[in-house]
Image (spheres, rainbow, N blue to C red):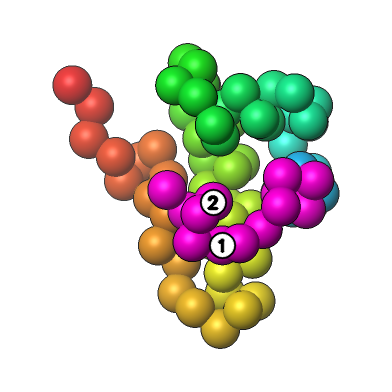
Amino acid sequence: MGTALSGLPLPGLLIRCEGAGGDLTLDRLAALVWSSAPRTALEHDIIAVALNDHLVDDGLNAPVATSSDVATP
């Protein structure tokens, strides 16, 4: 997942998520990132945007797919 690639600690990801318009708590973000907790498309997209922004800032591309890029069953 993009979180491992980013090297971004969870509190830093939370700040990035807030900057992307999210209102997740640290506990909710941890559940979404580190478990298979169900997530909404909006939650997925907020995390994807936050990770991609961080990776682009580090000079990498944006490899984390948004919900519109992920096939649904």
Quadrant of the image occupied by residue 51: bottom right
The answer to whether residue 21 shows anywhere in this view is no
Tag 1: residue type? Ser
Residue sitting at x 61%, y 41%: 46
Q: Which residues are magenta?
A: 1-13
Classify residue 2 as left or right of residue 26.
left
**Farthest residue toward the top?**
38
Query: In the structure shown, which secondary structural element does the residue marked by tag 2 occupy?
Result: helix
Q: Quadrant of the C terminus?
A: top left
Mark number displayed over residue 39: none
User: Marks 2/1: CA distance?
Assistant: 5 Å
| Image location (x, y in percent) of residue 40 | 51, 22
Q: How many marks?
A: 2
In this picture, is 3 found above or below 27?
Answer: below
| Image location (x, y in percent) of residue 58 | 61, 79
| Image location (x, y in percent) of residue 66 | 42, 45
